[in-house]
Image (tube, rainbow, N blue to C red):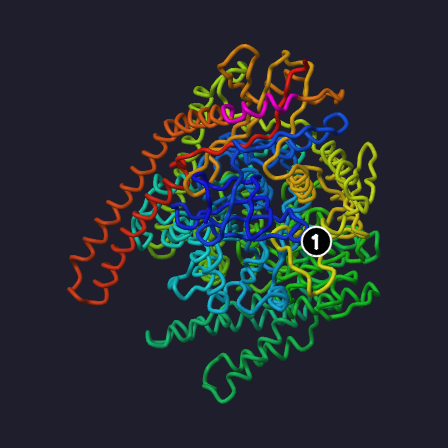
């Protein structure tokens, strides 16, 4: 059993199972007095090993601070004491309300990003839907939030779900810029892990920070039993609109997965540039993933802006353009006159056949009776073949052939078969190589200066169809005399690459990485819309060519966002290829295509999303609407009208939802500004050293990160001769990882070794010869990231030397072990009064669930002739004694005189922490009351809805049983939330903890 009344504290030492351990984290199991204590071994037999002990099962003996033994520090310059104290300062979690942006990462800080972090931390349990427009750097904001949560000890276990094309990009961005290590697990990765662990071991418990494709995990039936037994501190879902659920959410695997993870995580971040599809129900489900008590209606249809404002943030380019000067380049659209040409005679013959097919089908549809009309209204026939031909003859011919084969033996009286046969005959004489569209493309490539050679600018070409993609790649390879292989594994190693939805994960990520690598031979990527969401392609590319035109504003905005985004250093240049026809029935379509392009550019300079123009919120729905209401109807103004003017009242719901989101976004911002103003007005004055302000809010440190690494490693090397000497310059520190560090970072020398998943870094980032290169200059890291993109890919060779880096965390743990358990060094300072004695403590007040509420460094000082000790801020005392400059003169501390005063000092320290605890509880009461009122309001509203629906049901019916179950689940949730929320974030444990770190005695 755990022999203490206080929750386990990270940084403390314990004895368990005849070995000594250092606590790294403590998780509440039941919100009572039982904890899972995460530890790293200290003794020789367990050194570096990770373990978890359960307080109700294991015999765990913590250190009694009153029994701490004072030991003389004989080290030169009191280096032992300085490093031991520094390690403790770095071990304790931050607890202040205001985030510390210093050293947070490698990026240009902007106010809108800082606002995101503050909004997240304003919530006691960060749960946020980040819905900024395409290209505004949502991944950077996620990294900022994660970094702050890690500083607070609340992001030990992280799960990121992303699209398969995004995995490496997301993973490397967090590692390069924030030192956040995510291990990538795809289906094969999970299988490999399971080969190394016992059959009943949960693979998601092995690695603590994981990124995985949502397509891999959404097989809930396969992984559900593992996921149900795994808790996460933070879950992040990128492109979160994909998990909002469909009309039947219980059958939507991605939604079921997201809901399961939501219930198994403390914090949750959802990111998407398309937060809704126009349906209140779907958006309500996203919000309910963040907080089940946000929306009262269990069907997610009845809610307002006030219900969702706390969980939702949305900004557009125009909102940040002024502060993002130099980060958002003005884009250029090549005038359509330069990218448009008339169809050839052979192409006009195909257009003629398509026009006849459209006319005949329209006549047949008009003549059909009502029962036949639905069968006759076929999108493929009405406009599908036409759209395919606008892409390439190959794409159209293949579909025509498949359609004719399917119709064999069907109704021969239909106009469809003879018209398709005529169309097929005319298409057989055409190829992409002979098409006007391809001729325009080659002319544009010549203007750009592209020839496929290494000095060619990179170009991203979008097409909608696989047949066009393949034909285009082979035609360009032939014309430019370039070798091209269709195999997936060859795409990243040749000048022209092809990616599509069928490309396997590993090859897709490798190809995208090669396209962003300057030295790669890849100079052109031909992509379907698998590359239109999320991928950053702006670092080495500023040219996009839309080979064919998707009939969707949403798709075009997503495509352009691949290169038109924060950090683009050159003006993005967009080209849209258009082919004119003289066929009267089709000629008017050009006006619609031209207006579609203009509309996308207008939206680029508006504070609105592209989805809100037609209010359809789905690319396929937009295509169908533009086709039916514009192209087939001959309506050139189709893009000037909202869909609600042509369709049913469902678009009115979308209109109302859009207005609600704007109101919620503004209300959330206003509440946030009020919170900041109130916080500023009530903040205590920290200029007076006697003011009781928890020191951790100021991130007090003795050493800069780089100096700590150098000094601490050199100190350890003296005790470990096998450590290789550090190499350091003014700019770089090179660490040759010792064996224990390599194991700590997850490098296994053989298959039988223990997997250090909790502290593993991405193996893709592992440096040559185990040499880690760290710098204290963020600008140099930025240059290194660019150099990597130019030479090798995503992974930077230099990283920021920050306390978040796993190497510094390893160093921290090793330095904490340099003093034996139950001991603290005592030193002599000439800057203290003779006979004065200062006991330096770090105290902590935790919630009942173990979350740190207050961490405070302070000193209890005794003065000669004064029986009353005095409490003083630690930072002020260390400054007074000039701790960073103090030298070891060999003066003997009077340990015999100091040791008897320790008991009194500990009591004073605990008394001080009780004072801070009581003050914190008073400060938290208004927040607790506010949350309890909100929860009660939600319960009352939901109960009214459910009871009213229950009145309309037949007693004993399935619907009545379901509603009764909903009421029971609501009551269970409220009871659990009231207790667990209070115990996690408000209710402090009855007994604070304190640790004596060092004692300082005045020189005689």
Q: Does the magenta-highlighted stretch encompass residue 659? A: no
Q: Is residue 84 visible?
A: yes
Q: Is residue 630 visible?
A: no
Query: Would you say the magenta stretch is mainly helix, strand or loop?
Result: helix
When asked about the image quadrant of residue 6, the answer is top left
Q: Does the magenta-highlighted stretch encompass residue 898? A: yes
Q: Nearer the viewer, residue 353 or 292?
A: 292
Q: How busy is the neighbourhood of tag 1: few (under 14 within 10 Å), some, or many (20 plus)?
A: many
Residue 474 vertical position relative to residue 94 in the rendered view, above or below: below
Q: Residue furthest bottom?
A: 409
Residue 13 vertical position relative to residue 711 in the rendered view, above or below: below
Residue plotted at (67% across, 34% down): 326
Quadrant including the C terminus:
top right
Per the rendered image, the range of residues in magenta is 894-905
Q: Where is mark 1, residue-wise?
A: 743
Question: Regarding mark 1 in the picture, which secondary structure is present there?
Answer: helix
Q: Residue furthest top?
A: 865
Mark count: 1
In the image, taking residue 946 as reference, residue 668 lies left or right, namely right
Residue 684 vertical position relative to residue 850 in the rendered view, above or below: above
In the image, taking residue 173 as reference, residue 442 lies left or right, namely right
């Amino acid at each position: 059993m755990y022999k203490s009344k206080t929750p386990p504290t990270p940084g403390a030492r314990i004895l368990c199972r005849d070995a000594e351990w250092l606590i790294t984290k403590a998780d509440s199991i039941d919100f009572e007095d039982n904890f899972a204590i995460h530890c790293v071994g200290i003794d020789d037999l367990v050194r570096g090993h990770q373990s978890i002990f359960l307080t109700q099962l294991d015999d765990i003996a913590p250190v009694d601070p009153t029994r701490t033994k004072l030991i003389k520090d004989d080290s030169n310059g009191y280096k032992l004491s300085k490093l031991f104290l520094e390690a403790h300062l770095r071990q304790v979690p931050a607890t202040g309300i205001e985030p510390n942006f210093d050293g947070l990462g490698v990026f240009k800080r902007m106010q809108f990003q800082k606002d995101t972090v503050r909004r997240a931390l304003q919530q006691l349990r960060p749960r946020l839907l980040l819905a900024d427009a395409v290209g505004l750097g949502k991944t950077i904001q996620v990294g900022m939030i994660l970094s702050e949560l890690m500083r607070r000890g609340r992001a030990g276990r992280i799960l990121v779900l992303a699209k398969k094309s995004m995995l490496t990009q997301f993973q490397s961005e967090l590692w390069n810029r924030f030192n956040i290590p995510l291990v990538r697990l795809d289906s094969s990765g999970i299988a490999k892990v399971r080969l190394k662990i016992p059959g009943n071991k949960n693979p998601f418990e092995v690695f603590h920070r994981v990124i995985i494709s949502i397509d891999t995990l959404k097989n809930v039936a396969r992984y559900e039993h593992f996921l149900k037994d795994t808790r996460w501190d933070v879950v992040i879902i990128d492109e979160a609109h994909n998990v909002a659920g469909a009309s039947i959410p219980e059958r939507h695997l991605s939604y079921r997965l997201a809901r399961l993870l939501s219930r198994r995580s403390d914090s949750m971040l959802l990111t998407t540039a398309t937060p809704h599809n126009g349906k209140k129900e779907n958006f309500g489900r996203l919000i309910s993933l963040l907080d089940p008590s946000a929306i009262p209606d269990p069907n997610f249809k009845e809610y307002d802006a006030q219900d969702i404002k706390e969980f939702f943030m949305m900004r557009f380019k125009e909102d940040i353009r002024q502060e993002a000067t130099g980060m958002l380049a003005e884009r250029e659209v090549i005038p359509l006159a330069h990218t448009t040409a008339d169809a050839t005679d052979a192409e006009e013959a195909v257009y003629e056949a398509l026009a006849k097919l459209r006319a005949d089908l329209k006549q047949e549809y008009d003549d059909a009776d009502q029962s036949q009309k639905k069968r006759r209204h076929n999108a493929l026939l009405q406009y599908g073949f036409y759209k395919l031909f606008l892409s390439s003859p190959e794409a159209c011919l293949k579909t025509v052939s498949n359609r004719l084969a399917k119709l064999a033996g069907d109704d021969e009286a239909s106009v469809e078969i003879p018209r398709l046969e005529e169309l097929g005959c005319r298409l057989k004489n055409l190829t992409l190589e002979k098409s006007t569209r391809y001729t325009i493309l080659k002319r544009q490539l010549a203007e750009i200066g592209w020839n496929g050679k290494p000095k060619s600018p990179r170009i991203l070409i979008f097409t909608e169809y696989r047949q066009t993609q393949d034909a285009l790649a082979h035609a360009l390879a032939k014309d430019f005399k370039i070798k091209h292989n269709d195999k997936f594994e060859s795409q990243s190693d040749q000048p022209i690459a092809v990616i599509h939805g069928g490309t396997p994960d590993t090859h897709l990520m490798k190809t995208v990485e090669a396209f962003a690598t300057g030295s790669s031979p890849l100079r052109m990527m031909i992509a379907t819309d698998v590359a239109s969401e999320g991928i950053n392609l702006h670092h080495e590319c500023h040219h996009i060519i839309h080979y064919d035109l998707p009939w969707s504003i949403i798709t075009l905005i997503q495509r352009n966002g691949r290169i038109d985004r924060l950090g683009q250093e050159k003006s993005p240049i967009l080209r849209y290829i258009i082919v004119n026809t003289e066929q009267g029935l089709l000629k008017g379509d050009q006006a619609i295509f031209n207006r579609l392009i203009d509309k996308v550019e207008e939206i680029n300079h508006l504070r609105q999303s592209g989805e809100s123009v037609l209010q359809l919120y789905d690319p396929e729905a937009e295509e169908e609407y533009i086709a039916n209401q514009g192209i087939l109807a001959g309506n050139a103004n189709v893009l000037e009208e909202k869909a609600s003017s042509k369709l049913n009242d469902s678009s009115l719901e979308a209109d109302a939802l859009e207005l609600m989101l704007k109101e919620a976004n503004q209300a959330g911002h206003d509440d946030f500004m009020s919170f900041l103003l109130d916080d500023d007005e009530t903040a205590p004055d920290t200029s007076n050293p006697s003011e009781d302000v928890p020191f951790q809010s100021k991130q007090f440190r003795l050493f800069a990160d780089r100096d700590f690494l150098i000094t601490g490693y050199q100190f350890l090397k003296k005790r470990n001769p096998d450590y290789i000497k550090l190499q350091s310059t003014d700019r770089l520190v090179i660490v040759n990882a010792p064996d224990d560090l390599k194991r700590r970072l997850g490098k296994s020398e053989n298959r039988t070794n223990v997997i250090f998943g909790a502290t593993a870094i991405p193996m893709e980032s592992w440096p040559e010869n185990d040499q880690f290169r760290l710098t204290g200059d963020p600008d140099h890291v930025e240059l290194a990231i660019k150099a990597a993109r130019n030479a090798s890919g995503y992974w930077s060779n230099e990283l920021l030397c920050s306390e978040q880096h796993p190497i510094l965390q390893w160093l921290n743990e090793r330095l904490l072990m340099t003093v034996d358990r139950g001991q603290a060094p005592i030193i002599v300072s000439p800057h203290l009064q003779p006979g004065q004695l200062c006991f330096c403590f770090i105290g902590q007040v935790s919630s009942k669930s173990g979350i740190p509420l207050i961490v405070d460094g302070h000193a209890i000082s005794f003065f000669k002739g004064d029986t009353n000790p005095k409490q003083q801020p630690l930072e002020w005392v260390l400054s007074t004694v000039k701790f960073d400059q103090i030298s070891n003169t060999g003066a003997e501390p009077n340990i015999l005189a100091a040791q008897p005063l320790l008991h009194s000092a500990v009591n004073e320290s605990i008394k001080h922490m009780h004072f801070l605890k009581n003050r914190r509880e008073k400060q938290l009461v208004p927040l607790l009351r506010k949350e309890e009122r909100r929860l009660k309001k939600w319960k009352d509203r939901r109960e009214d809805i459910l009871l009213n629906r229950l009145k309309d049901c037949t007693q004993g019916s399935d619907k009545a049983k379901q509603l009764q179950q909903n009421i029971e689940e609501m009551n269970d949730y409220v009871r659990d939330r009231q207790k667990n929320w209070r115990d996690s974030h408000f209710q402090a444990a009855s007994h604070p903890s304190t640790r004596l770190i060092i004692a300082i005695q005045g020189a005689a």
